[in-house]
Image (tube, rainbow, N blue to C red):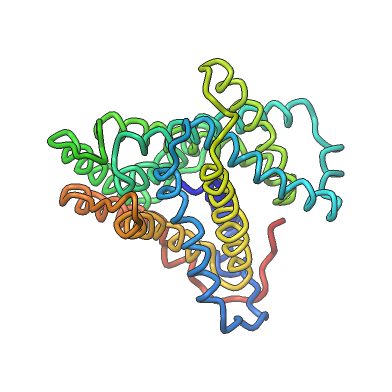
């Protein structure tokens, strides 16, 4: 899964919760008076592509899953650091309390476990099955929000997530029946991908309150730093090889960091100024389709998913799309709405 998507989905979930509490249409959080750039579809397309390359690139790497995750986060922080220094975003850390730091550590640890389990899943199952199953994280968000935050899901959300679970079961059933040269242990890989969905869902929930008080780059910088520490501890505990790495691996690490972060993450945040958040949510759900197509045509992978993966993946994405689409009452017209930080 694209590592930038968690932050994007936190923003989208926060906007939806804000609209429900304030009883205003979700569309009012966009800049209704700003002219929509003609190149916005190209920006969204580039952002989707930026997300979609993450899985195939991780499959191409021969490095340990923890090494891929550690260097991906390290390179991302090398980009985020100068941004924080230039914008003064680091000053926001002065207002943090001990509880905030504890939340950041917990969120970063969950993100580290997500990276580890999801990247490791690509060693055992297909790219298509992995990216579909790891995108089941809305199930964790809805369940956690209902249990811990008192936010009741709508009937549409419950129906959509139920359909997504049926689709996941179809994918798992198909993988339990056969394996291939590119999927050594598909069912185990599916389990790892689902663990990746579970841990990134917990990351979303843990980071929600903190994201409300920090700007985007300050939040990402803090949580990614905690994530890097957790990854280093895991690498030390498991004796994973972080260094040295062949030159080819450094190109892959850099591409995994730059594609999702600078292209995917920045592109979707730019689009949020002009389009409703649910549009961006739906665009993010195109990632599994893009990753599957890229894996099918990339030399060194050439991976064509089986019929069970295709059918189950389609059901998963349809269910998630149903859950993302807002009820009609959130599509109303109106004046200028409040902006979220």
Q: Considering only vertical position in the picture, is 325 above or below 106?
A: below
Rendering coords of residue 53 (x, y %) = 45, 55
On the rendered structure, is 130 left or right of 258? left
The residue that appears at 71% across and 50% down in the rendered structure is: 79
The residue that appears at 71% across and 42% down in the rendered structure is: 221
Rendering coords of residue 264 (x, y %) = 55, 59
User: From the image, which quarter does the C terminus lie in?
Assistant: bottom right
The mark total stands at: 0
Tell me, yes or no, if residue 2 can be seen here.
yes
Rendering coords of residue 319 (x, y %) = 31, 53
Q: Considering only vertical position in the picture, is 43 above or below 22?
A: below
On the rendered structure, is 264 left or right of 61? right
Q: Considering only vertical position in the picture, is 119 above or below 160?
A: above
Rendering coords of residue 66 (x, y %) = 51, 30
The residue that appears at 65% across and 44% down in the rendered structure is: 75
On the rendered structure, is 210 left or right of 278? right
The residue that appears at 47% across and 34% down in the rendered structure is: 63
Viewer-proximal residue among 328 and 108: 108
Tell me, yes or no, if residue 322 can be seen here.
no
Residue farthest toward the front in the current orientation of the protein: 247
């Amino acid at each position: 899964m694209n590592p930038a998507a968690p932050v994007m989905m936190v923003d989208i979930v926060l906007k939806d919760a804000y609209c429900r509490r304030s009883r205003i249409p979700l569309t009012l959080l966009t800049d209704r008076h700003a002219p929509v750039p003609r190149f916005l579809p190209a920006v969204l397309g580039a952002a989707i592509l930026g997300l979609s390359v993450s899985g195939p690139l991780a499959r191409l790497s021969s490095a340990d899953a923890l090494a891929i995750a550690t260097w991906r986060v390290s390179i991302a922080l090398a980009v985020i650091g100068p941004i924080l220094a230039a914008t003064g975003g680091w000053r926001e850390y002065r207002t943090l309390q001990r509880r905030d730091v504890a939340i950041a550590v917990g969120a970063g640890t969950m993100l580290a476990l997500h990276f580890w389990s999801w990247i490791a899943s690509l060693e055992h199952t297909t790219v298509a099955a992995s990216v579909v199953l790891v995108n089941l994280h809305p199930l964790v968000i809805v369940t956690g929000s209902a249990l811990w935050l008192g936010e009741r899901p709508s009937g549409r959300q419950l129906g959509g997530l139920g359909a997504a679970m049926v689709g996941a079961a179809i994918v798992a059933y198909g993988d339990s029946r056969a394996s291939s040269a590119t999927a050594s242990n598909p069912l185990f890989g599916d389990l790892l991908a689902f663990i990746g969905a579970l841990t990134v869902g917990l990351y979303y929930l843990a980071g929600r309150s903190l994201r409300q008080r920090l700007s985007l780059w300050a939040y990402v910088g803090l949580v990614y730093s905690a994530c890097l520490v957790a990854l280093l501890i895991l690498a030390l505990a498991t004796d994973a090889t972080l260094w040295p790495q062949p030159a080819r691996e450094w190109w892959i690490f850099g591409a995994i960091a730059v594609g999702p972060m600078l292209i995917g993450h920045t592109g979707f945040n730019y689009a949020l100024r002009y389009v409703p958040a649910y549009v961006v949510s739906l665009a993010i759900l195109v990632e599994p389709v893009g990753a599957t197509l890229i894996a099918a045509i990339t030399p060194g992978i050439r991976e064509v998913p089986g019929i069970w993966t295709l059918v189950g993946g389609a059901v998963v994405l349809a269910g998630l799309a149903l859950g993302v689409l807002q009820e009609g009452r959130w599509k109303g017209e109106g004046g200028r709405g409040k902006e979220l930080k």
